[in-house]
Amino acid sequence: MTRALTRKGQATRARIVAGAAAEIRERGVDEVRLEDVMAHTGTSKGQLFHYFPDGKEELLLAVAQHEADQVLIDQEPMLSNLTSWPAWLAWRDRLIERYLAQGVKCPLNGLLGQTGRRAPGAQAIVTGLMWRWQKAITEGIRHMQSTGDIAPEVDADRAAAALLAGIQGGVLLLLATGRIDHLEAVLDLTIERLRAGARTA
Amino acid sequence: MTRALTRKGQATRARIVAGAAAEIRERGVDEVRLEDVMAHTGTSKGQLFHYFPDGKEELLLAVAQHEADQVLIDQEPMLSNLTSWPAWLAWRDRLIERYLAQGVKCPLNGLLGQTGRRAPGAQAIVTGLMWRWQKAITEGIRHMQSTGDIAPEVDADRAAAALLAGIQGGVLLLLATGRIDHLEAVLDLTIERLRAGARTA
DNA sequence: CTAAAAATGGACCTGCAAGTCCAAAACCTG
DNA sequence: CAGGTTTTGGACTTGCAGGTCCATTTTTAG
């Protein structure tokens, strides 16, 4: 459709998205006004609506996509290389570290609730994220099965689904209670369990 | 503080809360205007602010508390009587059934995001809910340990924490993707695992 | 160099939803 | 039944945030 973005234009657009994302992470979706984004990114209303003709809706969607991508990027290169137990533990540590640092600020939780109903697009973004995430975990499990580090009877898909759910819940509980215990418990117990099945090869 | 609520007054207040809760469940927090609540409950603005002087904020808090209580009530009497494997499975079935029926409509997810930042009270409500929930699960595990149905080496607190996280994540994924698979996987795999430890007594 | 297109700034408009106010009705209580 | 209190209805105010518009500057391309 619309092809016409100068290098400068792209930079500005990116700056808006990144700035809005930061602002939202910091203060929550429904506390952030377009004016805040303008102030924080040094842009004007004209620019916002120039790059996001559909207004806030479209901007929020772009932010959601940006944040969703970041979630997976933050887990690399571990997530794509769950090929040994040390690798799994490194991944575990990265997750804990990442969410501990993030603390109570969750970008996507709010975005799902905020735009979820209105925009069908937001739903798609989150679904896509979860799907990719789960796929990576599944592949990790399968690989470990191929090396005999995980019992072949384990249903990789179900195990990955459960683990992903545990992680999501752990993060949710971190948001709600401020404690990381749940996330730790999920990761440690799940990994321990996967490991327990088959020690032989 | 304020003591002065006629029976009629209490009824009206309750009607407002219940109606608002229903409306919010149906259409999402940020889609519901006070006007909608008025129309849906047959009340006037005067009444809203009579029973909730602090306005929407206070109303939402009351709704959140109402919904939080309901979550646990819906799991009874199973949740408080996790004293045998059939009881655990019945609880599992109830959870699946309940959330399957609820579908994509989550009252608390939105309320946490919406009021979470503003009102410190919302945080407290969710935290309280989670704490009570986890406590019930822990007690269930402990009871099963006392009868020898679960191995004594199991750390009841950690196991409960992980299970609760899994459930939360399962529900979250149900909201996001519309599929109940994750919740099922978590419940089945976790129960299976608790069961596997000690079959002897 | 010049004309078209893109990028920018900011004044202005507009609608809406929360919150205010007060007067009328219903209701307790002695 | 009389006085106070609670309950109710709804008109009105208000602030504000999203969105529109256009004039100006900057960039691109031939």
Image (cartoon, coloured by chain):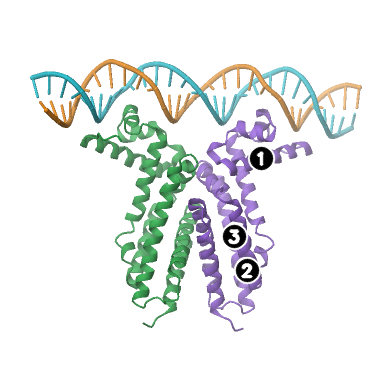
Chain colours: A green, B purple, C cyan, D orange
Q: Which residue is mark 2?
A: B88
The answer for how far apart the CA atoms under marks 1 and 3 are is 25 Å
- The C terminus of chain A appears in which quarter of the rendering? bottom left
Q: Which mark is residue B96?
A: 3
Q: Position of residue B172 (x, y in %)?
A: 50, 54
Residue at image coords 21%, 37%: A7
Cβ atoms under marks 3 and 2 closer than 8 Å: no
Q: Please tell me whether mark 3 sits on a helix, a strand or a loop.
A: helix
- Whichever of callouts 3 and 2 sits on the residue coming sooner in the sequence is 2
Q: Name the side, left or right, on which B132 lies relative to A37.
A: right
Q: Please tell me whether mark 2 sits on a helix, a strand or a loop.
A: helix
**Image quarter of residue B56:** top right
Q: Position of residue A161 (x, y in %)?
A: 46, 63
**Image quarter of residue B63:** top right
Which amino acid type is shown beneath numbered disc 1? Gly
The answer for how far apart the CA atoms under marks 3 and 2 are is 12 Å
Q: Which residue is mark 1?
A: B19
